[in-house]
Image (spheres, rainbow, N blue to C red):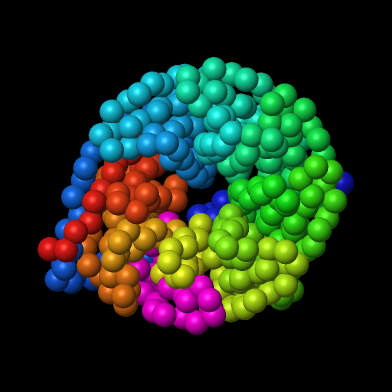
Amino acid sequence: MRLVLTLSLTALLAGCSLFGKEDGTEPMELVDFEPTAKVDRVWKRSSGVGQGDGHTRLEPAINDGLLYAVDYRGELTVIDRQSGKVSWDRDLDELLAGGVGVGGGQLLLGTDEGEVLALGSDDGRELWRTQLSSEIMSTPVGDGKVVAAHTLDGRLTVLDAQTGEVLWFYDNPPPKLTLRGRSAPVITDSAIYAGFSNGRLMAFNPQNGLILWEQRVAMPKGRSDLEKMVDIQASPILVDGILYVSGYQGRLMAVSRATGRPLWAVDSSSYQELWFDSSELFVTEDNSAVVAYDANSGTESWRNEQMLRRLLTGPVSVGDYVAVADDDGYIHVLNRSDGSFAARTNIDGSGVRAPLWSDGELFYVLANDGKLAAYRISPK
């Protein structure tokens, strides 16, 4: 039997001596700057006990003016995104590993025991649950017709959204060494798109699992298993018929949705979620450099390397600004025009692992200890 070893990224980077002390490989000290913007906290509240110690990244979801947030113990909190007031909550009494998916009137969650839970989005009542093959480290997604979930053993499973019955699955056994986690699939009427830990992006027929096309995002290189890691951790983004995808120790690519043909590709290594806004693509690389690209050509617009090795989240854009958070709980606001620092604040000392997200007006941050806050950015 082949032993599959799955690593958390923090442990992996520590093993690579990226967090040494005073040897030039420690997290970069924060630089002083003259703020040109202010970050106002609109509201802040608790949404449970947070991420726990298992290196989960339980990401909340926004739908119809509500935020759906969970902690690793299964506490579900539904919050008005403008006021921060709790609409309702429910204790699921489940250890969760996958964040909240919203679609087709359902809330979708993944447990560390490998179950997909479907709940009613209006009251949290359980609709069905289905046992899958292993732990669900990504966010299950659904469109009211089907639900797709990606498990830690590399299997993509597609379920009937109304009954939870397994329609089909695709096995893609992971390499010996992978990052801990899986990217969330993307569902459309004509295809389901999923990235795998062997560096491949694949498109499937939603009804029967027939492979429509596949594209290699990253090619294993080097001699050791560590050097050969080419995981796709970030969920693909679909915009106007183009899929944007990135791979760890691989490339950032724009791919035709219809054929899988690359439209452009640049060398890049990332494990954080991408962000697309108005023909710009924002990426946090694995060394915590924040980079902006022209989404039409792949041309690099700017790069900020003043926060290297600080374990930054993926970026989000809010108006004229881009925000990221780090492992110490600092929220860094950059000017969208050139990537320079505009403002900085701190949510708390527990740090931030979950991706930030934005509705275009506010952006939202979930700290590792369960503190959830909404912020507004304005010129100073």
Q: Is residue 205 part of the magenta span, yes or no?
A: no
Say which of 153 and 122 sits in front: 122
Left or right for 221, reference 171: left
Magenta part of the protein: which range?
292-313
Residue appearing at x 56%, y 61% in the figure: 239
Say which of 92 and 51 sits in front: 92
Measured from the top left, where is residue 350 in percent x and y? 34, 44
Vertical order, 143 against 326 (above or below): above
Left or right for 11, reference 60: right
Residue appearing at x 40%, y 27% in the figure: 77
Residue appearing at x 23%, y 38% in the figure: 43
Q: How many marks?
A: 0
Measured from the top left, where is residue 137 in percent x and y? 61, 42
Residue appearing at x 37%, y 51% in the figure: 358
Q: Is residue 293 part of the magenta span, yes or no?
A: yes
Measured from the top left, where is residue 174 in percent x and y? 75, 53
Please identify the dominant SS of the magenta region. loop
Measured from the top left, where is residue 128 in percent x and y? 66, 21
Left or right for 308, reference 37: right
Classify residue 146 by image quadrant. top right
User: Can residue 268 be seen in the rendering of this structure?
Assistant: yes
Quarter containing the C terminus: bottom left
Vertical order, 48 against 294 (above or below): above
Say which of 232 and 88 sits in front: 88
User: Can residue 135 be seen in the rendering of this structure?
Assistant: no
